[in-house]
Image (spheres, grey):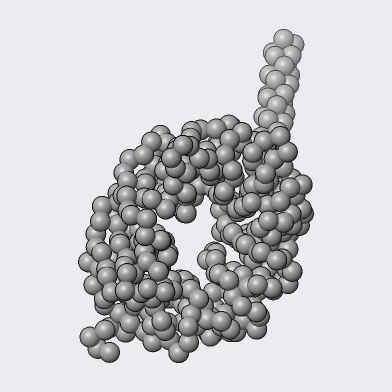
Amino acid sequence: MSNVLDEITIARKRKRRRYRLRRFIAVVSLLIVIIPIVFLIDKVNIYTFRSIKDFFLVTFASNKGYPAMLNSTKPNCTEEMKGATAILTSSELIVKATRGAELFRYTHGYSNPLVDTGNTRIILYDSGNKNYSIYNRTGELYASETEYALVSAAMAPNGMAAILTRGERSFSKLEILSNTNYLTYFTWYGVSGFPLSCNFSYDSKEVYVVTLSVNSTEVISVITFIDIDKREENGEVKLSGMVLDIFSDKKGYTVVTDKGAYTINTEYMVDNKYLFSRTPILAISKSNDYLALAFGDNNRVDINHIVILSSDLKQKSSINDVGSIDCIYMTDDYLYLLSSGKTYGISSSEGEYLLVCDILTRAKSIFMIRNKLYVLLHDRILPLEMVNIKES
């Protein structure tokens, strides 16, 4: 009898173990399914499906080819994006796909329109007024207005936006807008200096604000770096002169003022500098390895010249007798110079003229689409076929 009871007890224990094992497997399987769903739900926002639609519309945009007509008023500038080019005119924002198809067109009606782009999103704002709007490459996402007049705005690579205005009880007010709903993520107040500009680092982890102040002898630019996740200031750098442009990369920042060029490391210290005279700067362009500065006055083209610097601001070449300087575009191989109906390709390292292309009319700017050079004319985007100067 005891043997029978032992066998029954053993059978029950085995059954209970099998039940517990099945329950454990079921729980683990449920967790494997639920955790990714929870993660995805946390990532889904009101723009998720619009972003998916935007991706497919850009990816499968038709091949219209170039030249691409603008059919708009005077173009102001172009901004390169992932898979597209944004063109701002005095009356419209136009987005063209890399193969020439028009993705989006919006009549803004702004009196002083300015634009900034991230990888796939655009912020358009009316400088000196209060209106701004945010788009992806195929349509509008958000529109609003500020309490005070806009000084500057920027779009991060990850889609966050920055809005810089004057403050009521402070000299400047910076609002960082979330990329999930474009509500205020946090606000920073500047207590000194007049606000000049703002922008994001290349990795969207940091935002910086440039303000101007004056001491007894000169104008000082103050650059304040703010950690977005921590919502606190990381550091501050003061430079002589007014900041004209700032470039961000893994090594830190390259800053150009009207008095010099400076590199700022990740510890917010000035590593290198290149100082120059007070000759007006006509254009600035940077690639990974080089910085190009164009100096002079297009009313006195005999004084125009271009300096090419390495990434640590050592002079590589100085190019004189360049004629009028309408636009420059720096790559690691060439400095492209737009000058009075001609585009030249100049060696980045040696400063030697190597390539040329004639343009029938005066052009506005040069830019790249899929590593091919294009020029913005008053009514179209035109591909450039550069030829060797010796062959021409």
Would residue 83 be found to the left or right of residue 7 on screen? left
User: Is any atom of residue 341 visible in this view?
Assistant: yes
Q: Position of residue 162 (x, y in %)?
A: 63, 48
Can you say whether 301 is above or below 311 in the image?
A: below
Asked where in the image residue 252 lies, by quadrant, the reply is top left
* Residue in the image at 53% along x and 85% along y: 67
Considering the image in quadrants, where does the C terminus appear? bottom left
Q: Position of residue 46 (x, y in %)?
A: 76, 52
Marker count (numbered)? 0
Residue 128 found in image quarter: bottom right
Question: Residue most toward the top?
Answer: 2
The residue at 66%/58% (across/down) is 127
Q: Nearer the viewer, residue 371 or 319?
A: 319
- Is 280 left, or right, of 115 in this rendering? left
- Depth check, front residue: 215 or 144: 215
Q: Quick one: 169 or 159, which is closer to the camera?
A: 169
Residue 109 percent across, percent down from the top left? 74, 69
392 left or right, relative to 230: left
The residue that appears at 24% across and 63% down in the rendered structure is: 317
Which residue: 33% across, 58% down?
290
In percent of width and height, residue 140 lies at: 73, 63
Q: Is residue 114 above or below residue 300?
A: above
Which quadrant is home to the N terminus?
top right
Residue 188 in view in this figure = no
